[in-house]
Amino acid sequence: METKQTLPNSTAVLVLGICSIVFGCFFVGVILGIVGLNMAGKGRKMYSANPELYDGYGALNAGWIMSIIGTILGGLYTIYSIIVVAILGGVGLMAF
């Protein structure tokens, strides 16, 4: 019986995905999500090349999905922040 090795960085991708959702209301969530997506992409390529050699694909896939969600939430928050600053800046200029 052959022992399967765990996919490299599968736990790290899972943690980055969770943190990207938790910190999505800050700009850090976008960065963590992008790093998680990059690391998950490498792991997914390794797994698709030899799926019988690796274990831990579930954690990697869950981290990949959460990184996508965290990146989207962080991006939406960034766009929202830019719009709010632009509106408040416009209102501040009108006061003078």
Image (cartoon, rainbow, N blue to C red):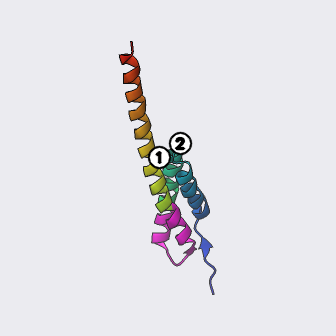
Up/down of 52 relative to 44, above or below: below
Residue 53: x, y in percent? 55, 76
Work out how far the residue at label 2 is from the one at label 1, CA to CA, in angstroms.
7 Å
Q: Which residues are magenta?
A: 42-63
Q: Residues within 10 Å of mark 2 (few under 14, many from 20)?
A: some
Q: Nearer the viewer, residue 27 or 81?
A: 81
Image side of residue 82 versus residue 31, left or right: left
Q: Residue furthest bottom?
A: 1
Q: Residue at x 62, y 73 (%)?
A: 5
Q: In x, y percent, where is residue 34? A: 48, 50
Badge 1 density bin: few <14, some 14–19, many ≥20, Cα 10 Å = many
Q: Which residue is mark 1?
A: 74
Residue drawn 46% across and 64% down? 45
Identify which amino acid the numbered label 1 is placed on: Gly
Front in this rendered view, residue 33 or 25: 25
Magenta-colored segment: predominant secondary structure: helix
Q: Nearer the viewer, residue 47 or 72?
A: 72
User: Mark 2 — residue?
Assistant: 26
Name which residue type carries label 2: Phe
Disc 2, disc 1: CB below 8 Å?
Answer: yes
State whether residue 5 is above or below residue 79. below
Placement of 69 over or under 49, stated as above or below: above
On whether residue 62 falls in the magenta region, the answer is yes
Which quarter shows the N terminus? Answer: bottom right
Q: Disc 1 on helix, strand or loop?
A: helix
State whether residue 83 is above or below residue 7: above
* Nearer to us in this view, 83 or 54: 83
